[in-house]
Amino acid sequence: MLYQVIGVCGFIAYMTGFAGLQLGWLDGNGCAYCVSNIIGASLVLVSLYHAFNLASALIQVAWIVLGLLGLYRRRLAVVSAHQLG
């Protein structure tokens, strides 16, 4: 039951980010969108501990890595802007 609740919270994080993107509330290149995907994927990955599925686990790990890369790119852009400015 606990793992199912965690997985549903991950689903909510994914859908909140995606809805925010589609409704124009979030920037697809912004930190909030990346963070919502990282949180969603992390929670779904935790939920897989109870009922493991390799394909789903690989998707979640890829989503986390890509989200972290997005945050890293945003950080580099901010640092570069401050150095130029």
Image (tube, grey):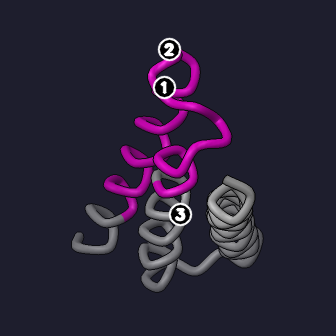
How would you rate the neighbour count of disc 2 (Cα within 10 Å): few for under 14, some for 14-19, many for 20 or more?
few
Residue at image position (31%, 66%) is 6
Q: Is residue 29 left or right of residue 51?
A: right
Depth check: 40 or 74 in front? Answer: 74
Circle 2: element type: loop
Q: Amino acid at mark 1?
A: Ala
Residue at image position (75%, 74%) is 58
Circle 3: element type: helix
Q: Amino acid at mark 2?
A: Leu
Q: Amino acid at mark 3?
A: Ile
Q: Which residues are magenta?
A: 7-35
Q: Are marks 2 and 1 in contact (CB under 8 Å)?
A: yes
Q: CA distance from mark 2 to mark 1?
A: 6 Å
Mark 3 or mark 1, which is nearer the start of the sequence?
1
In the rendered image, which quarter is residue 66 located in?
bottom right
| Residue that carries the numbered disc 1 in the rendered image | 19
Depth check: 83 or 28 in front? Answer: 83
Q: Is 7 above or below relative to 33?
A: below
- Judged by its main secondary structure, the magenta piece is helix
| Residue that carries the numbered disc 2 in the rendered image | 23
| Residue that carries the numbered disc 3 in the rendered image | 38
The x, y position of residue 25, in whole percent, is: 45, 22
Mark 2 or mark 3, which is nearer the start of the sequence?
2
